[in-house]
Image (tube, grey):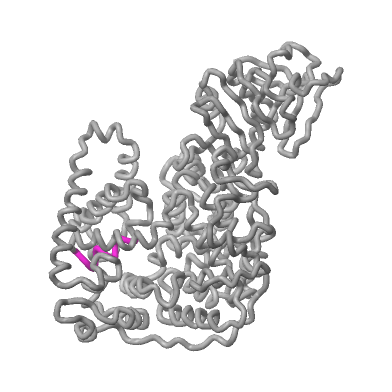
Amino acid sequence: MSDISDQGENVCQELYSHHGVLLKHHKDFKEEDTQCPGTLSVIDCNNGKYIEWKPTEVSVDSDDQEWAMVTTGGRRTRTTSGSVDSQTRSRPLRIPISELKSFRVTKRGQQLTFMQNEGVVYCIFFFHNGNADCFVNALRGNVKTAMSRKDKNLYMILNQRESQVLDRSFAELDIFTENKSDYVWKFVKDFHSHPYETTMGAFSKLTDAWLYGRTTADKRMEDEVAELLHRSWTTDEPINNVGPDEYEVIGTVPVLPPRPPAPRGNPLTIDQWARYQDEEGRVREVDTVKEIIFRGGIAPGLRYEVWKYLLGYYPWDSTSVDRQNLRKQKTEEYFRMKLQWRTISPAQEERFADFRDRKSLIEKDVNRTDRTIPFFAGENNPNLQLLYDILMTYVMYNFDLGYVQGMSDLLSPILCLMTNEVDAFWCFVGFMERVSRNFDLDQSGMKQQLGELQCLLSAVDPELSSYIHQRDSGNMFFCFRWLLVLFKREFSQSAIMKLWEVLWTDLPCPNFHLLLCVAILDTEKVTIMEGNYGFTEILKHINDLSLKIDLNATISKAEGIYHQLMAAAQLPDPVRLIIGLEPLGDLGNGVNGSLSQDRSDSVLTNGKSIDSEELDSMGAVTLTASMGEAAYDCAIHLNYL
């Protein structure tokens, strides 16, 4: 390393340099002004760290060399006087790392692409010897980064200023037993590569602090933590320029008729269940059975059998003999997968990082999942081992997804009901097929649901929706936990069983769980608005609703909202799509019908149409309101880490 004097005052230290690097592309340069070899360096100056590139023909010892200080706004500031070289290629570049968002290594380690905050390609360097990894390793050693688990060639550059706020906020709140600084950096880095483990872990600890361990001295720090959780969702993502001002879900607010009552009914009984089966055990009139379950749930003594149908373990048209054979087959398959992970040797595990990480996370979660419920209470409880074994076997069943924090919450009620390891596993598999999008590492499933929830709320209660937007909460992040584990932490064990079986009927529409969210928010509207709640207060209030929500009243209100929407004279296409109706193709609603149907392979970036393959080298996409909801949704699937 060496010291470099810049402008006589700003002393810079060269942290790493790499010779023979070609400037292949720069967003502000013409093509003929690039294609020039030089030295690429990481430097540390008084005012921050930079990526610096010097063409070989420029003397590094010259005191009057002309610098091009590059910013994301495209400005160049000359820092010394002297004659101007007519060739752009003769000027060094100095790029503030703080104004870069991410970088990617491609072309078999020969090409290094930097992206700026807007998600557009900023500059590209080419390493003739194919050793861009050396520069990347040096850069990562001096700059906080996070690798994408989905694309191991893509790295996010983390904001140092925000990390300091995180460090101070978490440390002063004092809710973590780990070293505070280490934990905070782990939180910042892991949010990109492990968004759900990170978020759920933080939420769990914040929940405990807010509900059970809060003191008056913590209030100011709680506000800061809530704010940074908010920012972690809204500003730390590759596509971070889509907000209420740039993306409107619906163009006009529909006029809704009065909300009709939707009374609840009685649960499906054993006698009714027997009447709907033929002599060979097939279930007849499946739609009628589902309607009864939606209206009133299932009698507790019958759940063990009916859940297997609702979760796809047993086909509705299977006979008693079919189910007996199927169960034998599924038992063999389960224990074959279980044997796979049980026979992994310590030496194999030592070389199997993903397996170790998932195993460790499962061990931690099992020990803290529903321990207050008698089924899991006490030390050395054998049911905890069952919970562990099923989750580990699911890792082998679906290694692409593996295990993400929150899955143990979904398995717990199923295992409590089934008690049988094999039956619980296959019912859990069916449940995960329904909600696996919640655990996508690219966050697209959750992002889509939160966007759809905001769309529904805008249509049902524009006043509340507008208020939430004004309080910087339009991303609906405060509903994150509701959706992630399907209200598991909001209701008692018996109530969540009833709610889930209602949702598993898929009645009256595919996204009825989003209408449940709208119903709860509608119930809390007066409290939120009259209390003049901001983002922090909304988050705390929603969190505090745990175990205080009236389940039957909420389901009834959600069904009433559904009938309201169905009876509307003119419903915008985005809302129609969410509740399962065909779009009308009204372009005035902000939806391009052909794109929403075909999920076009191209989206817009900076006003130009590009194919999805081109996105691999461009990072994130800049979106505008004119692109419509379908393009926004498509871009999320293509670009979210």
Relative to 256, is 304 on the left or the right?
A: left
Q: How many marks?
A: 0
- Residue drawn at point x = 48 percent, y = 49 percent: 442
Up-down relation of residue 592 to residue 139 (above or below): below
The quadrant the N terminus occupies is top right
Q: Is residue 101 left or right of residue 79?
A: left
Magenta span: predominant SS is helix
Where is residue 329, by image quadrant? bottom left
Q: Quadrant of residue 462?
A: bottom right
Q: Nearer the viewer, residue 14 or 276?
A: 276
Image x and y of residue 15, in percent = 59, 21
Q: Position of residue 95 (x, y in %)?
A: 68, 30
Using the rendered image of the protein, determine whether residue 262 is visible from the camera's viewpoint: yes
In this view of the protein, can residue 217 be seen by the observer? no
Q: Nearer the viewer, residue 484 or 212?
A: 484
| Residue closer to the observer: 522 or 87 | 87
Q: Is residue 425 above or below residue 127?
A: below
Provide residue 433's location: percent of width, then percent of height: 35, 60
Give the residue drawn at x 48%, y 40%: 148
User: Does the segment drawn in magenta span residue 13?
Assistant: no
Q: Residue drawn at (57%, 52%), measured in percent from left and top?
A: 635
Left or right: 508 as drawn, with respect to 377: right
Q: Which residues are magenta?
A: 410-419
Task: Estimate the x, y position of residue 31 in percent, counting from the top left.
Answer: 71, 28
Instruction: Assess whether residue 418 is covered by the magenta stretch.
Output: yes
Judge whether 254 appears above or below 69 on screen.
Answer: below
